[in-house]
Image: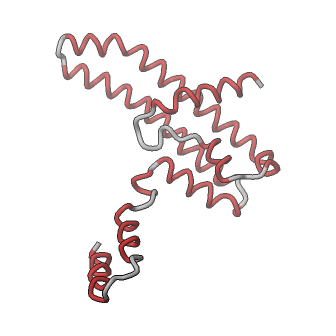
Amino acid sequence: RWPALERALRREKDLPQSELSGEGLDLVAVLAKVQVPPSVLETIAPTVDRYETDLDRALLAREQRMESLQPAVREAMQEMNFERGLQIMEQIMAARIEVRTAQERGLEAIFAALPEEYATAFRTEALEQAFPKVYGPNATLSFIAAAKAIEDLTPEQLEGIEAIERDY
């Protein structure tokens, strides 16, 4: 079980260093948050193991690429060679995209493996964590709902808030 522990430790250490939306997602943590029962987790274990292995491979590749390119980044900065710096950053970005791609493949595979009663909650939670600006709560709509909940609004005030909501 040592490789599984190494993968978990790498996820814990490396995922917070993500910069792209969806890159830093931990689907194992999402499964725990959705409270998928152990019997279901046992059933989907091969799919989760594939996700962990694919993600680990992508995280290792990202880490190695970033480490190997650090001297070139420093050199480009010292020489003020912006074109070379941009080329290097594009290589790092490609490694980040590979991590996000592993996340997306894992999300779809686990979603497909889960029973329907857990699949939707899993996908919803994963997307909200991966892309909070798109799938997370909308601050403006929350603010409008709070304004509408004020008890002593006049009918005109309530009508004005509802007009703002419709326009929004």
Number of dots carrying numbers: 0
Left or right relative to 54: residue 154: left
Residue located farthest toward the bottom when viewing the structure as drawn: 155
Image x and y of residue 121, in percent: 62, 59
Tell me: 65 left or right of 114.
Answer: left
Above or below, 29 relative to 40:
above
Picture coordinates of residue 40, whole percent (x, y): 78, 51
Classify 64 as above or below 45.
Answer: above
20 sits left or right of 72 in the view: right
* Residue at 54 percent of width and 38 percent of height: 102
**Front-lying residue, 54 or 11:** 11
* Residue at (48, 18) in percent of width and height: 64
The N terminus - image quarter = top right
The residue lying at 80 percent from left, 45 percent from top is: 42
Q: Position of residue 138 (x, y in %)?
A: 40, 62
**Quarter residue 145 falls in:** bottom left
* Display colour scheme: secondary structure
Picture coordinates of residue 9 (x, y %)? 63, 26
- The image quadrant where one finds the C terminus is bottom left
Q: Is residue 110 above or below residue 2?
A: below
Decide if residue 40 is on the left or right side of residue 81.
right
Observer-nearest of 7 and 108: 7
Residue found farthest to the right: 39
In the image as oriented, which residue stretches furthest toward the left? 80
